[in-house]
Image (cartoon, rainbow, N blue to C red):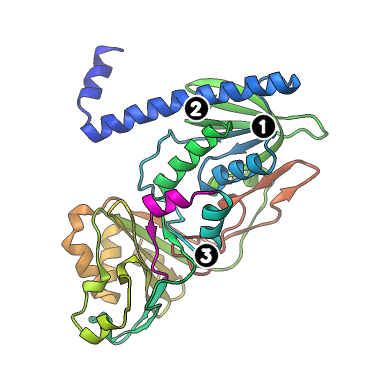
Amino acid sequence: MTRSARHRISDLSAEQRALLTRRLKTRTAGAEAAADAEAAAQAADGTEAGHYDVVVLGGGAAGLTLALHLRRARPGVRVLVAERQEHPVPEAAHKVGESTVEIAAHYLRDVLGLGEHLEQRQIRKFGLRMFFSNGDNTDIADRVELGSSVFPPLATYQLDRGRLENELGAACAREGIAFLPGSRVLQVDCAPDASPHRIRLAVDGRERLVHARWVVDATGRSHFLGRRFGLRKEVGHKANAAWFRVGRPIDLGSWSDDPDWHARLKEGRRELSTNHLMGPGYWVWLIRLASDAISIGIVADAGAHRFDEFNTLDKALGWLRRHEPQCARAVTEHQDRIQDFRVMKDYAYSCERVYDGVGRWCLTGESGVFLDPLYSRDWT
């Protein structure tokens, strides 16, 4: 290690050094797992190393869950997942999918067997909750509230996406799936016949060629195969979103002292719901996370609220002060803890095709379709 590298490491905080150590360990373990998987495949059927049944491009929630599902449905299948980000990722990764609905919770818990992780490392969600506008929205107790007063019978969860993806990556390694974090897809040459597809990756600064019977695009909004094949299709739904996280909990349940409003709940806390502050042509989501952060986002119809009214942090805070003053006041109190800010213009889109059995490719997750009429970070 060079002296300059040692100096750079010494300048890191304890948390940053711990994260770097975990990433290096995981990277080594991932490389060893990939090598072991290839060796096992060779020993079993003589297949050349670097040849897989399925190569998944993208190791987010969609790619990792698909890889696990394939492995469990067909234990002999050889799967490689190529993910651009290093692992482990930061726990509070800022991605779509911070809140599960019932079908996604069932899939993660009961199909993939992640019940222990969800119960111990994530937050059980207190259902979906909506507050409809009333006057100037200065007292949440005056708004019509739609939401359960007890925990719904089917458990759902609020997700720190980084925590989930780290757990999924570890599960893939345990089950012999070759997982290559820190790899970039350079080129995919789809074979026109039954020959293997050729995928060129950049791993640790070196080029690596792998072959696959099937290739799956799980690159999300990068749309790797979708762009190549010209598959994207507009849907005419013009809505925009902006969101950020605050690095401390914000308890929506403390916004009113009305005893009748508080007595409406028989159990649970409103702050643990996926909360929506509803207004004409918009809603604002508030999603409490297990990392003691909260995700707050604005979703608005472009015909009712121009995107340039909230497409920067300062504009978004001003927009909240005009439309949701209680939320704006809570955020302003902790403005120094705002962690990030993202926007998404015209977020809804579709795709001409997501599967080709003859060509042996498919798209999954956001690589293909993202319509979500209630865009509030739910993962379905």
Answer whether labels 2 and 1 touch (C-beta < 8 Å). Answer: no
Instruction: Name the foreground residue: 70 vs 360.
Output: 70
Among the two numbered marks 2 and 1 on one chain, the one whose residue lies closer to the N terminus: 2
Residue type of the residue flagged with mark 3: Glu
* Count of all numbered marks drawn on residues in the image: 3
Mark 3 lies on residue: 102
Tell which of 240 and 270 is nearer to you. Answer: 270
Q: Residue 196 location, x and y as percent?
A: 75, 29
Farthest residue in the left direction?
333
Instruction: State the residue position of label 1.
Output: 78
Local SS, label 3: helix
Question: How far is the residue under mark 3 from the one under mark 2?
Answer: 32 Å
State the SS at label 2. Answer: helix
Tell me how far mark 2 sits from mark 1, CA to CA.
15 Å
Q: Looking at the picture, does residue 95 appear above or below residue 279?
A: above
The reply to whether the C-beta atoms of the residues labelled 3 and 1 are less than 8 Å apart is no
User: What's the mark number on residue 30?
Assistant: 2
Tell me the residue at 62%/27% (across/down): 200
